[in-house]
Image (spheres, coloured by chain):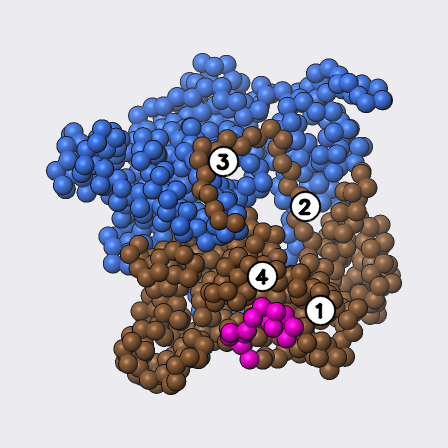
Chain colours: A brown, B blue
Amino acid sequence: MSTDSGGAQQTRSRSAILDVVRAAGTISRVELTRATGLTGATVSTVVRRLIDEGLIVEVGRAESTGGKPRTLLRLEPLARFAVGVHLDIAGITYVIANLGGGVVTRWRTAGTGGDAAEEIVSRVAREVDDMMHRVDVERDRVLGVGVVGPGPLSHPAAAWTTTPEPARLAGFALVDALESALGMPVLLDNDATAAAVGEYWSGGIESTASFGALYMAAGVGAGVLVDGSVYRGSSSNAGEIGHVCVDLTGPECWCGSRGCVEAVAGPAAVVAAARARGVDLGPAGRPATEDFGTLARAALRGDAVASSLLTFSARYLAVAAQTLATVMDLDHIVLTGPAFAVAGSLYLPVIEDHLQRTFFARGSHALRVRLSSSAHEAAAIGAAALVLQSELVPRPSAVRMPAEHTVAVASSVPVER
Amino acid sequence: MSTDSGGAQQTRSRSAILDVVRAAGTISRVELTRATGLTGATVSTVVRRLIDEGLIVEVGRAESTGGKPRTLLRLEPLARFAVGVHLDIAGITYVIANLGGGVVTRWRTAGTGGDAAEEIVSRVAREVDDMMHRVDVERDRVLGVGVVGPGPLSHPAAAWTTTPEPARLAGFALVDALESALGMPVLLDNDATAAAVGEYWSGGIESTASFGALYMAAGVGAGVLVDGSVYRGSSSNAGEIGHVCVDLTGPECWCGSRGCVEAVAGPAAVVAAARARGVDLGPAGRPATEDFGTLARAALRGDAVASSLLTFSARYLAVAAQTLATVMDLDHIVLTGPAFAVAGSLYLPVIEDHLQRTFFARGSHALRVRLSSSAHEAAAIGAAALVLQSELVPRPSAVRMPAEHTVAVASSVPVER
């Protein structure tokens, strides 16, 4: 075996063992061997190293059937930490999570509204630093910082190529700037993808599920996990269900297309329609998610105009759910994100009813739909979890690439870069 | 290592080696070790066994830099075969392929039109038997028969739960019946999924691509391959882009939904619209794909009504391509299937233009679109390739399932079974 693949193999074994121990709570070496398919020798070696590093501890013995009692192992959750940062125009949500996925602390500060990119960077660095100090998390125990938000990601993910808010972070080299300011590794990802990971990480999703998180904040998106791994597509921009066309002659969208679910029926569109119809949402100029909350509360009190606007929106979110479930063949959908946190009970029955009649594979298997119980924080939790996963979860072994396939492209779509 | 995971590991090593040898053409044991990441000892053992079974042969020596010349290995393509059967109302397309992916023979017989399921089974068995005899392919060298067609698959895939043609094959235990009649293993899959595999197998797709085959016969579908593996979702029913809603108040679809791309703008819908507008398509009662061909030829000759009908259809196929590419984050789309074989040149520019303006990740990476050069046969080739892949392609190692995640489902969509 070459040195390279030996090293890669060792990293995989380490991640696999950490992940099994985390999920099991406590587990013996023998059970670890069985669960990972690794040899007993490999498990022994890797576990000894993880104990030396403080990531795993021995916690007593279990009864054994026949043989000598087996020593139990568990993760030391306080050995490492990760920071999650969810950037949104309405607010920045922060989470510090430990290696076991437990949330050590979470907090929220005012939105990024009209701030310049450099101001956002220095502010995030300061707010993360302050909190680490306050909750006594040492810098050398932090694996990294996950930052998530809306918009298409560059590939590899170092910046957003465009964003809903013109000029704010579009094209800005956010990863480089934050790594310099924080002195820690930074990963960038999509908020809906992070929300899916956050929902999975918080429990309640079967690990075998083809699971989609339908995410609604000011915009609409989705993240999909298959067998616990994020479906990423070719550039981590998969799942953008808010930007599929439901009306060829519909309104223009910030993404450059028209008739997108988000532009037709997302919270910002609903709020604009409500103001146009004279619904009193208080002073103008607040983030769309706040106005949307006001509108949802009016609908829940029985206001007819608010109800009809939200029902209109729900019908299109139901189409988005149908498209996501039918294209990706999901068996589980969670409605999450701040907009579903306030209006989920209005959307859920409409979405369920629509899926019951339209999900393509409904004759083959069930499709469960439910509201998240952590819809406000799932994206920030997922941002931290993505950092932890890079330490914990075994990456799929490299797929071999046939050497002889040639690329014969008859025509290509030119793109801006 | 337990016996079970040892066995699984051996199967994976065997598949990995076969796949690398197939893709490389000729390759030495040293290069195999490097390409697979397996140990030299494992490669030696597995290669020796494959030579004994006749699947691999030694074919001379390569110059070596310094050391002794290395023996080269190649696949023996005639060691094993697979049969592909594409069932369609307009015709049954058959392919016999060898282990190297080469097509030994292909033929086509009349469509399955109004035939009862039992008649289709006995006819397919007879036609496959006859041809194996004629081209001198022995039964014990045939790995199995892949059968593909439209409609949602049961899980595991043993039947279609519903089909576009009422009562013909819906709910019929096709795999059992065909295995009895043929005396060979049978796998069932979706025609669009098979078409994607056929396109990939025939070359022209980069193995690293996130690749979608947009498939159009009488209906509309898609198959997606990521790094050369089919994206299956929870029940192999992924990619059903013909059944996403583009018009909430649109026409009813055979799938039970309404406003589906297929019902609004698929070939059958276009042909119905043409007949309603008095376009002369010859006698009624022919399969929709044949009428669609007549209409496409009229459009290519400059007929204004035919052109406007196909442009209308192309705009919705473009939306389907946008949805597929945006949700799955593709970097490569091939237009394939019999309807694109006759009308692809009319659809391609409309689809390209639309994607150039609307594909969500267009600022992050290119999205190539091209017409298939084997649009008629891709599904049948893919049906055979799916059988070969089960022998050749290493399955991804099992993903570990966290033991502690519980399932808390707030509500579920009841489904017919």
Please give the range of residues in magenta. Answer: A110-124
- Within 10 Å of disc 2 (Cα), the crowding (few <14, some 14-19, many 20+) is few
Q: CA distance from mark 2 to mark 3?
A: 21 Å
Q: Which residue is mark 3?
A: B197
Image position, residue B403 (x, y; %): 65, 62
Q: Which residue is mark 4?
A: A172
Q: Earlier in the sequence, mark 2 or mark 1?
A: 1
Chain ID, mark 3: B
Mark 2 or 1: the one toward you:
1
Which of the pair B80/A238 is nearer the observer?
A: A238
Q: Is residue B323 left or right of residue A198?
A: left
Q: Which residue is mark 1?
A: A182
Q: CA distance from mark 2 to mark 1?
A: 32 Å
Look at the picture and state if B309 lies above or below B290.
below
User: Is residue A152 something that shows in the picture?
Assistant: yes
Q: Circle 4 sits in a helix, a strand or a loop, which is it?
A: loop
Are discs 2 and 1 located on one and the same chain? yes
